[in-house]
Image (cartoon, rainbow, N blue to C red):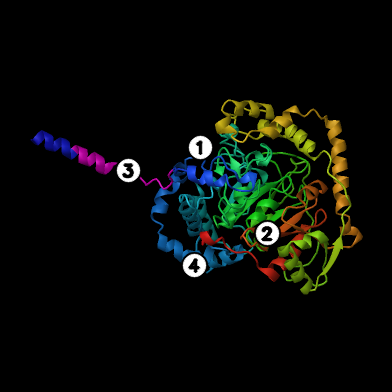
Amino acid sequence: MKKYLTLLLVVILVYACQEKQAPDFFQKYDETQALEKQQEHQNPRMKFKLFQSKYLNMNEVFKPFENELENFSEEEYNMLKPLIIEQNIPSIQKSVRDGQLTYEKLTLFYLYRIRKFESDSTKSLNAIIALNPNVLNEARQRDQERASKRIDQNKVYGMPILLKDNINTAGMPTTAGALALSENKNTKDAFIVTRLKEEGALILGKVNLSEWAYYFCSGCPLGYSAVGGQTLNPYGRGEFETGGSSAASGAAVAANYAVAAVGTETAGSITSPSSQNSLVGLKPTIGLLSRVGIVPISSTLDTPGPMTKSVMDNWIMINAMYGYDPNDSKSYNYVDRNYGTFKDNLKGKRFGIIKSYLQDSVFNANVNIIKEAGAEIVEITPPQVGLPGFLTLLNIDMKHDLPEYLKNHTDPNVTVRSVKDVVDFNLKDSILRAPYGQQLFDGIVADTTTVEQLQEIKKTLMKNARQYFEALDTENLDAILSINNYHSAFSAVAEYPNITVPMGYKKSGEPMNMTFIVKDKEESRLYVLGNAFEQLTKHRKLPKNYE
């Protein structure tokens, strides 16, 4: 009997000493019924084949934060909500300065909130691909440093930021949503990430995107990647498109998963998801922000840019990221031109609009608001010019630019070295790696356009696009007004910046944005105009199921 009692005691002690297992918050669910319903959607790009990632284990993603989150209660979360939800950077910094908040608590709040919604199968947005395992330690460090210095309220210092997962970030994978880059785990920071860290920002994690920045499959859903699954729009999960390719940069910020996010754009990939998620998005002049360390489509057109809940936050983010990078051929030293201040209104401004757009009731209502504020509206008729060779430009740029990135900016364990390598890799298991096909990558491989022919295409594209916007000069306009990403391709090849600002919602609840387009290197003008419009209208609303 004594022998058995001893054995029982040993078993009890071993069990008691075992590390306490945290519950699995993230469970796979049966998505069959939801996918069947999705096939009834009128938009063919919304006929999803799957929602959940077959690659990610979100319990593993959250594992570094188990202990801290266990001690962060729902009560504390609810107490902090008024200080954080929908608040801009200056307001959050004030709460920190007043002792109501710390950078550590701010970061814990976002981690808790992400887990809360992303582990709920009825609310998950499939937004997160990776989290920075050291972010809480970094937040504590910011709190310690803050004690000995005064932090400007218009700075990103201590602010948790999410990055699109095509932006290299030390300590986290950079996949562009592609399983071909799943081993891209050890890279140096992209130039803009280094700048954010120098300014004291906290890189919270990486977010989902349309795979290869939506230059991969044809007619496939926006926001899908083999790594991250199907990103969903918080204003209507499975009902409204997320926009893309910076899909989860939009969805995550709209749902208040972070203070702000960084997206990238070739032609519409910031403007589109910002519009679809009722955010402010800036597509800057090519070269204002470095592209080094970012998975490319086109060295001619690519640019990162901030996606935020307010114009003020957007301006703060751009100031934290810009800087001359000698390793980027298009980088330049920004010279701020005086187009006014954030105290300015729209009185006396001249805006060009295309008359047919007034048939849109939301756009029309906002144009009337702008008129009543004292601005002058000028109806314009852009010349009938096309963009011949636009897809060829993307094909040939990516054929040359992607190998350059793969050679110089990836983990040695990444084996693909060209677009053709990626195509061949995916063919080995196309159901998992490319369920919607890879038609655009096939087109890149097949395109035989020469570099000399490409140069002529580039010249024609820029000439036509700048001619399209000639009213900026001929009518002495402050900006041309557009809807969502309607003019993204023209803006891209003209290399003109634009800012998109919430202008309301359709009857269905789907967000819509007013987009301001100006000439190159006039970002300051965009911020003055965008802020004045935002303060005049204040359209943005938090998605109702993410309060």
Mark before the other along the chain sequence, 4 or 3: 3
Residue closest to the far left: 1
Residue 42 lies in magenta, yes or no? Answer: no
Mark before the other along the chain sequence, 2 or 3: 3
**Distance between the Cα atoms at labels 1 and 4?**
41 Å
Give residue 100's mark.
4
Please give the name of the residue rendered at 9% of the width and 36% of the height, measured from the top-left corner.
2
Please give the name of the residue rendered at 74% of the width and 48% of the height, measured from the top-left corner.
324
Query: Mark 3 = which residue?
Result: 19
Q: Is residue 216 above or below residue 262?
A: above
Q: Amino acid at mark 2?
A: Met
Tell whether 74 sits left or right of 94. left
Query: Mark 1 = which residue?
Result: 54
- Residue 537 rendering spot, x and y as whole percentages: 68, 69
Task: Find residue 90 and report its image quarter.
Answer: bottom right
Q: Is residue 366 above or below residue 49?
A: below
